[in-house]
Amino acid sequence: MIVVSNTSPITSLAAIGYLNLLPDIYGTIIIPVAVYEEMTGLGYSVPGTIEVQTLSWIEKRELKDRLLLKDLQKELHRGESETIALAISLNADRVIIDENPGRKKAMSLGLNVMGILGILLIAKRRRLIAAIQPLMDDLILKAGFLVNQRLYLDLLRSAQEIDENQ
């Protein structure tokens, strides 16, 4: 399975100590150079910085299609643009993006998009984690992850952690 990830899913999962869910679910994760540079070129460490430089299951790839990138950068940040362009050029099975503009653009281009909350749901269903609620709470508190209350409750229902009527 070919999976390309943007920056925030990696940094967010690393911030809460669950970066291992990515290889447990997908095996290898591919990141574009822009994502690598966003994480390593800041002059200070963000969650996941060491991991993208050292873990064998995270592969950095250079994007060849600069025309598509230029077009995407009219609407999106460099990291999101390269993530989407690389996913298209590799004919990726999945692209992992959390930010709404990037998700919408990726879906409009026919990509199969997954976000960090979907990853938590898969992990729960595969019994890689016992519950998603504590991890969602950690994402909010430790990683500054934004999730509206309706989506939060919908995910808890989907994970069968609260009653359908709540």
Image (cartoon, helix red, strand yellow):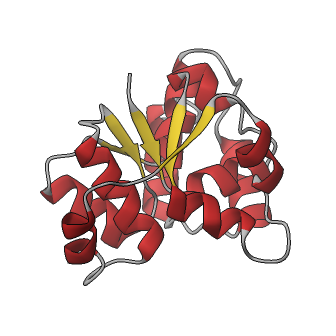
Q: Position of residue 16 (x, y in %)?
A: 79, 49
Q: Where residue 12 sits in the image (x, y, percent)?
A: 68, 55
| Residue appearing at x 25%, y 72% in the figure | 72
* Closer to us: 156 or 121: 121
Which residue ends up furthest to the front in the rendered image? 64
Residue displayed at 42% across by 77% down: 77
Q: Can you say whether 156 is above or below 128 in the image?
A: below
* Residue ID at (30%, 35%): 92
Q: Looking at this rendering, what residue extends furthest in the bottom direction?
A: 74
**Quarter placement of the N terminus:** top left
Do we see residue 32 in this rendering? yes
At x 85%, y 74%, the residue is: 44
Q: Specify whether 86 is left or right of 111.
A: right
Q: Is residue 164 visible?
A: no
Residue 91 drawn at (x, y percent):
23, 36
Please identify the quarter of the rendering in which residue 123 is found.
Answer: top right
Number of numbered discs on residues: 0
Q: Is residue 71 left or right of residue 76?
A: left
